[in-house]
């Protein structure tokens, strides 16, 4: 914590003070709430206690804590306190346990512990202990006896005064005096018999320790306050022997039980139960209960949760469980047995405002208290000088018989319940409470029966098979089982029907996710690692060709087939027509020639045939002329290695000028017909390219998967060889070197489908 002051340039204003908190270190030595912490006298060691039944020691270096280790004390810790020692540097720690006992533990040094495996201090044992034996019943009996004797003495004094006054009026005879003395003796014996007719009582469970401190006058003693049965007193105690071993505690408890059994009468129906070793493991079972040295009564009934002395030691500030704070005056400084006057004031809640801590300001003018109810109170405390003056000057005054008028709250809410409504609501709440109580009892009974039935079945399973009951034998009323099964089936069917819509919704959502992400997947990404190097190869995560692609491919193929079929049909049609015409002309010519050879046609028919013959002869003549032209042209054809001078000249000119070609980006460029690309050809080419790219990826992925399978087979073969080596190694001598294969395994990224 840092304190400081911000300078103020204005002289009329006060400087502002500040306090800053800085985090120096954060440790978590316990798994449950920390209940107490303490430094030793030299602030070189630090100890903490917790509800997890452990205390943790730390070594202090400057502002930092270095853990030494923890020790299991066997119970929740109420408080830890260092015992002052002049000789030892570390000293001992007094641990107050909520089990009702106190133990003393020595603090180890950093050199005595081994932190390599655990912080547990296995070689530390308690060097002293104390287990409180309840004496509250005896204290209450002594107080009651003193009150009875006081009343008897007062009544005896009154009787003696009456007897003396009567004797003054009329002298007593010896018989009257003897009779009165006998009556007085009978009264005294009755009182003494009432006092003697008493037996001590002890709580069924040991009272837990609420708080404790060392005696300021003698550190060999300590004071504790108890909860529950032994509350309301402060007990002065002294440490005794350390806890016994488990076996010694078991032998001692066994001897006590045997002694109680021997003293019991033969008519005792419930003999005491023998203890077990597990019961003796608790720390309170291994400490011999002993009575406190002295007790100081505070109020006899309320638990004392905290106390603190003032600087002079003449006032003891006591905090109680009911939220009350008592300022107790002491006749002797720091002596808890010299109580005199006191005054109480209640600031915290009476049911949940137990006082946790009380402290005084440096000048003891203010008292600060903190309670379990989450409140923090700051009160002004009267000084000791003013207190003595007030006690001397002011005395207690007799209260007035006049009773002040009580404050009554009016009913301002128009919706407030009437008396009858409040009565009916109270009755309804009572019936509801009874019903809930009955249901709780029924559930408890059913649970007990279920546990009993389970134990019977477990006991039956441990029996030999020849005397073991079958499962059907436990079914005493089959109809009940059938009804329960039907009821369960109907409930299951009801749940199915109630969740049918949600189940179908989840199924459809899962199907959509599968169709979106898993179904179209062709290959997952597989990474195959090499054996002895860091090289690896990964496949490409690809999807299958979509349905739209397949449909487009089929449509384009169909259109292309239709166009090709149409072209072929036109060509076939043209060739058929030409062939038909030629065959008809040839047939007509052959027929005419045949008829002319047999007889000479006359008339119109003869003229028509003569014209056709003339046409054929003309055609044959033209063909012969054409053949002759081709023969002449072929005779003029140059050789294959002939080069035209004009072409050579043009080539030379092109080489000189170079660039007289129309580019595609030029404005006068004309796309040739063979290079013209229409929409159909472009779409067809795009589909083919997509399919070719998919084919390449698929083949590559298939090769990677094949490589992975090959690696898997190699590993299996290596495992077989390693097993053979292991079998052969058994036949070798012990001093021979063990040879085994280091076989790498398959990584998860190589089999993502798993």
Image: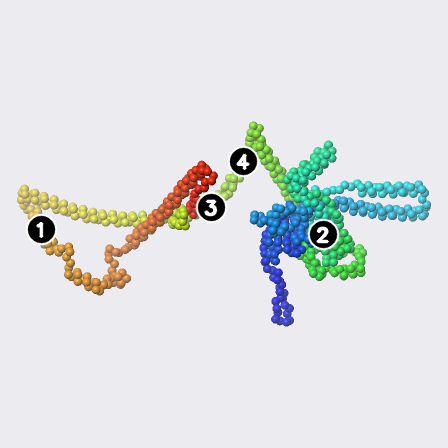
Q: CA distance from mark 4 to mark 2?
A: 72 Å
Sequence-wise, the earlier of marks 4 and 2 is: 2
Give percent across and percent down for residue 337: 76, 52
Q: Which residue is mark 4?
A: 485
Image mark count? 4
Give the left or right position of residue 195, taking residue 671 as reference: right
Sequence-wise, the earlier of marks 3 and 4 is: 4
Q: CA distance from mark 1 to mark 4?
A: 111 Å
Give the left or right position of residue 586, taking residue 223 as reference: left
Q: Which residue is mark 2?
A: 219
Give the left or right position of residue 440, taking residue 495 as reference: right
| Secondary element type, mark 1 | helix
Give percent across and percent down for residue 640: 15, 55
| Secondary element type, mark 2 | loop
CB under 8 Å between discs 3 and 2: no
| Disc sitting over residue 506 in the figure | 3
Q: Which residue is mark 1?
A: 624
Sequence-wise, the earlier of marks 1 and 2 is: 2
Q: CA distance from mark 3 to mark 2?
A: 73 Å
Closer to the observer: label 1 or label 3?
A: 1
Rendered residue at 72%/52% (across/down): 219
């Amino acid at each position: 914590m840092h304190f400081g002051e911000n300078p103020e340039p204005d002289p009329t204003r006060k400087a502002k003070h500040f306090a800053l908190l800085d985090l120096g270190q954060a440790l978590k030595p316990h798994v449950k709430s920390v209940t107490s912490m303490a430094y030793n006298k030299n602030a070189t060691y630090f100890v903490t206690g917790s509800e997890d039944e452990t205390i943790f020691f730390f070594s202090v270096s400057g502002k930092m804590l270095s853990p030494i280790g923890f020790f299991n004390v066997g119970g929740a810790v109420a408080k830890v306190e260092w015992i002052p020692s002049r000789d030892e540097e570390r000293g001992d720690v007094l641990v107050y346990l909520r089990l009702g006992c106190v133990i003393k533990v020595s603090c180890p040094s950093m050199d005595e512990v081994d932190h390599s495996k655990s912080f547990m201090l296995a070689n530390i044992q308690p060097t002293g202990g104390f287990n409180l034996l309840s004496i509250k019943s005896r204290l209450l009996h002594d107080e009651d006896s003193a009150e009875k004797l006081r009343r008897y003495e007062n009544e005896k004094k009154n009787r003696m005064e009456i007897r003396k006054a009567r004797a003054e009026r009329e002298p007593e005879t010896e018989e009257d005096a003897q009779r009165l003395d006998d009556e007085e003796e009978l009264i005294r014996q009755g009182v003494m018999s009432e006092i003697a007719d008493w037996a001590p009582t002890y709580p069924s469970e040991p009272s837990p320790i609420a708080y404790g401190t060392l005696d300021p006058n003698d550190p060999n003693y300590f004071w504790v306050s108890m909860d529950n049965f032994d509350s309301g007193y402060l007990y002065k105690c002294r440490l005794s022997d350390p806890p016994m071993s488990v076996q010694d505690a078991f032998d001692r408890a066994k001897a006590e039980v045997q002694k109680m059994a021997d003293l019991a009468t033969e008519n005792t129906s419930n003999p005491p139960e023998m203890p077990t070793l597990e019961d003796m493991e608790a720390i309170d079972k291994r400490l011999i209960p002993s009575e406190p040295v002295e007790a100081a009564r505070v109020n006899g009934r309320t638990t004392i949760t905290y106390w603190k002395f003032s600087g002079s030691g003449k006032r003891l500030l006591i905090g109680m469980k009911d939220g009350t704070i008592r300022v107790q005056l002491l006749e002797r400084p720091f002596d808890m047995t010299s109580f005199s006057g006191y005054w109480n004031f209640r600031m915290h809640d009476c049911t949940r405002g137990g006082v946790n801590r009380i402290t005084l300001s440096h000048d003891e003018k203010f008292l600060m208290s903190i309670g379990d109810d989450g409140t923090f109170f700051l009160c002004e405390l009267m000084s000791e000088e003013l207190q003595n003056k007030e006690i001397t000057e002011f005395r207690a005054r007799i209260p007035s018989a006049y009773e002040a008028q009580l404050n009554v709250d009016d009913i301002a809410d128009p919706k407030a319940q009437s008396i009858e409504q409040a009565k009916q609501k109270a009755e309804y709440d009572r019936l509801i409470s009874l019903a809930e109580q009955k249901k709780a009892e029924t559930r408890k009974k059913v649970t007990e029966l279920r546990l009993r039935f389970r134990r019977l079945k477990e006991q039956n399973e441990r029996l030999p098979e020849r005397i073991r009951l079958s499962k059907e034998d436990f079914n005493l009323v089959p109809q009940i089982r059938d009804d329960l099964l039907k009821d369960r089936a109907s409930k299951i069917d009801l749940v199915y029907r109630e969740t049918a819509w949600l189940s179908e919704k989840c199924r459809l959502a899962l199907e959509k996710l599968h169709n979106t992400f898993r179904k179209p997947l062709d290959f997952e990404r597989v990474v195959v690692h090499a054996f002895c190097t860091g090289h690896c190869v990964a496949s490409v995560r690809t999807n299958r060709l979509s349905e739209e692609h397949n449909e487009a491919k089929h449509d384009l193929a169909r259109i292309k087939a239709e166009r090709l079929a149409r072209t072929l049909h036109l060509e076939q049609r043209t060739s058929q027509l030409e062939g038909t015409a030629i065959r008809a002309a040839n047939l007509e010519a052959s027929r005419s020639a045949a008829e002319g050879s047999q007889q000479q046609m006359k008339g119109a028919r003869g003229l028509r045939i003569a014209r056709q013959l003339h046409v054929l002869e003309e055609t044959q003549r033209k063909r012969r002329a054409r053949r002759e032209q081709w023969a002449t042209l072929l005779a003029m054809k140059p050789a294959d290695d002939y080069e035209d001078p004009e072409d050579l000249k043009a080539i030379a000119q092109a080489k000189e000028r170079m660039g007289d070609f129309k580019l595609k980006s030029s404005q006068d460029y004309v796309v040739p017909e063979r290079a013209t690309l229409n929409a159909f050809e472009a779409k067809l080419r795009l589909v083919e390219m997509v399919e070719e790219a998919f084919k390449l990826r698929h083949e590559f992925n298939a090769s990677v998967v094949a490589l992975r399978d090959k690696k898997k087979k190699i590993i299996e073969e290596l495992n077989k060889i390693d097993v053979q080596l292991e079998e052969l190694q058994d036949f070798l001598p012990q001093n021979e070197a063990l040879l085994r294969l280091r076989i790498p395994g398959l990584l998860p990224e190589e089999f993502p489908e798993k």
